[in-house]
Image (cartoon, helix red, strand yellow):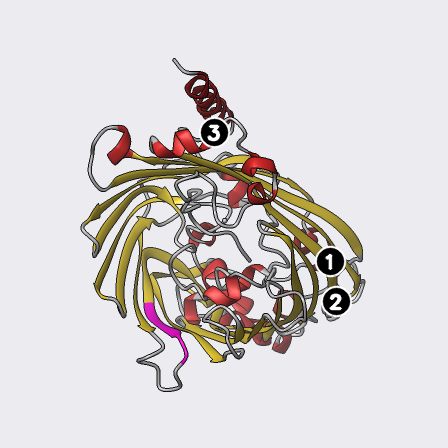
Amino acid sequence: MPATKLTATAHLLAATCLATLTGTPVAAAEKESYNTAPTGIPDPSVATSLPQNGDADGSRAWLAQHGVTYGLSYYGEVMGNPSGGFSQGTIYDGRAKIVVDLDLARIIGWKGLSFHGNAYQIHGQGLTRDHIGNLLTATSVEALPSTRLYKASFDQKFGDKLSVRIGQFPADAEFVVSDNAVSQFINTTFGWPALNQSNLPSAGPAYPLTALGVRVKYDPTDRLTLMAAMFDGDPAGPGKGDPQKRDNDGLNFRLKDAPFSIAEAQFHFKDADSAIGLPGTIKVGGWHHAGRFDDQRYDANGVPLAVSGAAPRRLSTSHALYGVIDQQIYRLPGGDGANGVHLFARITAAPADRSLIDLYADGGLRFAGFVPGRPDDTIGFGFAYARIGDGGRADQDAVALGTPMPVRDYEAVLELNYMAQIVPGWTVTPDLQYIIHPGGLVADPKSSDPAKPIPDATVVGVRTLIRY
């Protein structure tokens, strides 16, 4: 066997061994898939800044030509809250990812079939869990330390319009996504909205947990995309404590729980078709969970929980509706769809009687290409609001009975950041957040006054992302 093939085989075996050790058979924001060029190098990647693209022997390109691509990425963050929260502190957290993509049309001759697998190694502390106690988690990296399988799925394409995905994968990579929000901001809620995270069992099939499921995607025209998916409805399974501890390696593979279904229609506006001559996308959708949910205010007899102290009434099913818009509103002279000013907005609502958060909205602006001499840098400003549902009114019941406590109403966050590209595939992002009413306005666990809420928090930090 030629030396290049021997080296390539060794690279593949090494990637496979690493994947095995991390629990996989062979996610602000990273792309869901690496979508590599024929060289096997993802776009963007620090490899393009290395001598010979970091592939001196050509093994990465050889593997890509034979249907195997791989990649590594790393997030690292230093974040702190100099004021507010239930305590002040500074943390470091990080997440390493390995990705292996297999083009099974090239490998075994199965036309249109591919496999995508990735695994995470998550480490460090959590600013939200250790210092602030907010619902809108301060960073999209924060999770309990673990090494876990994240995705292992097969994709089958039928021509250019229809595809089916089956296996273990997240919903937040494709559904309820604002591309401008998730690519720019650090707070978790700008990816998977806090309404979904707070109301679904185990926070739904979203980072750091995924679930077994099937997704169908159909593109009847260039301007319209239709998607629907069904997942096992509880990625970690029922039980007490943190769901991440109940599924600490991503290997639960559950199919026993009431299903979670989600569907979305996307309308894409190209330059010639947009009323203002600029590209944009509108998405509308909804989800339905067939399980049972606790009433936030009443027991089985219709008596307020604050009065009876009994178990909450159980309600059948839950659901939510949502809308998303991404729109370029200004284009730099001579620029394209990537540069200029981009607006995003999302709104989603759920039944108040069974939802901790019954209304959620976010929005913001992203400025790309405005810094002289820094055409790839971006500046973002975002705002998110999460309203507490009937649970807040249950607090009013308790206060009326003489129990001193804050009455929950909402949580909100403002975020401002600057994403600087060092080289393609390497960014550094200083970040500033202000968190209003952490936990929705709940009692400060460090205070002797039960009616004193957790103070509003200021969060400052910096994130780096490297993709190879």
Q: Residue 290: which quarter of the image?
A: bottom left
Give the residue drawn at x 24%, y 35%: 105
Q: Residue 295: which quarter of the image?
A: bottom left
Image height check: is 451 above or below 72? below
Q: Amino acid at mark 1?
A: Gly
Give the residue drawn at x 40%, y 86%: 276
**Few, some or many C-alpha atoms within 10 Å of disc 3 (few <14, some 14-19, many ≥20)?**
some
Q: Which residue is mark 1?
A: 461
Front one among 441 and 329: 329
Q: Nearer the viewer, mark 1 or mark 3?
A: 3
Viewed as shown, does residue 239 lie left or right of 233? right
Q: Amino acid at mark 3?
A: Gly
Tell me where the magenta segment starts and ends, as one range: 278-285
The x, y position of residue 90, in whole percent, is 78, 52
Give the residue drawn at x 37%, y 72%: 281
Mark 2 and mark 3 lie on one chain; the one further toward the N terminus is: 3
**Few, some or many C-alpha atoms within 10 Å of disc 2 (few <14, some 14-19, many ≥20)?**
many
Q: Which residue is mark 3?
A: 58
Q: Amino acid at mark 2?
A: Thr
Q: Which residue is mark 2?
A: 458
The x, y position of residue 38, in whole percent, is 39, 40
In the structure shown, which secondary structural element does the residue marked by tag 2 occupy? strand
